[in-house]
Image: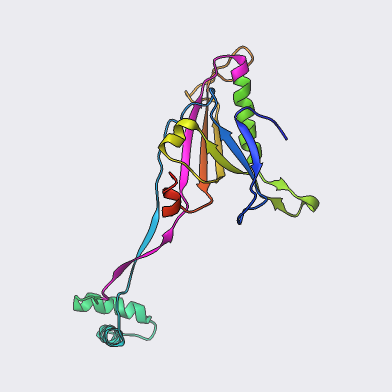
Amino acid sequence: GIQISGFKTETIKTGPNKGKVVSIMTSQDFIPMPQNIEVSYPKNWSAKSGLQNQGEISAYKMFKQKMMNSVVGFVETITPEQAYNQGQYQLGLTLDDKKKLLFEGIDFRQFSFAILLQPNNAAEQQKIQDWIFRMKFDSAPKLNKGDSFFQFPNFFRLEWEKLNLLFKTGDLALTNISVNYTPDGLWSEHTDSLPTATRVSLSFTEIDIAHQDNIGKGW
């Protein structure tokens, strides 16, 4: 494949993603730490009715029907839910369904990094352009035989020494890459016509869940 400084690849050997290719991003002098480093650990909690027995449920339904029947000028075109809402308003009451907060799962962690790349010489500039190309290339799907199917893009793995001191990540999907060749708001170029600065914004979504076992590994 294409050999670019700052990258190596490997094929996943086991698990549900067996056979998928991972592009491993390694620490390089020309890749500084991102300008923004933030990681969140989202959880899904939702309020649900806490009615626990048939008696509570029956009483709830009876009182809800009473509120619906209290609507003045009830007409057939109004829905039961609209009648219930109107009954709440007219009586100045609402039902206590003894809500409980229930845990419903975990979302995938997402990471967004903005990296300002400022080469010191032509050789470093070429490394940056090659690195950007590789990010775009590996995050794009391959059109499969017959032009009817896309083959999955590569996953990514961050092996940035300083970043990994703060937290580790699982394998990632690169969901977006944005390249700004005028990060200072105007065009500035070297003698070879390449830009003096480039800001690359990367958006990743982790493909595994950050449960306790993974957090225990440093996630």
Q: Is residue 212 rendered magenta in the image?
A: no
Figure check: 94 above or below 45: below
Q: Give x and y (percent) for residue 188.
A: 54, 17
Taking the spot 63% from the left edge, 35% from the top edge, the residue there is 8
Q: Say how many tags the image has.
A: 0
Q: Give x and y (percent) for residue 84.
A: 30, 79
Which of the pair 172/179 is nearer the observer? 172
Q: Is residue 103 rendered magenta in the image?
A: yes
Figure check: 176 above or below 62: above
Q: Is residue 101 left or right of residue 22?
A: left
Q: Is residue 148 left or right of residue 175?
A: right
**Residue at the extreme top of the image, as rendered:** 191
Taking the spot 61% from the left edge, 35% from the top edge, the residue there is 135
Which of the pair 218/61 is nearer the observer? 218
Q: Give x and y (percent) for residue 28.
A: 55, 26
Figure check: 42 above or below 116: below
Span colored in magenta:
97-124
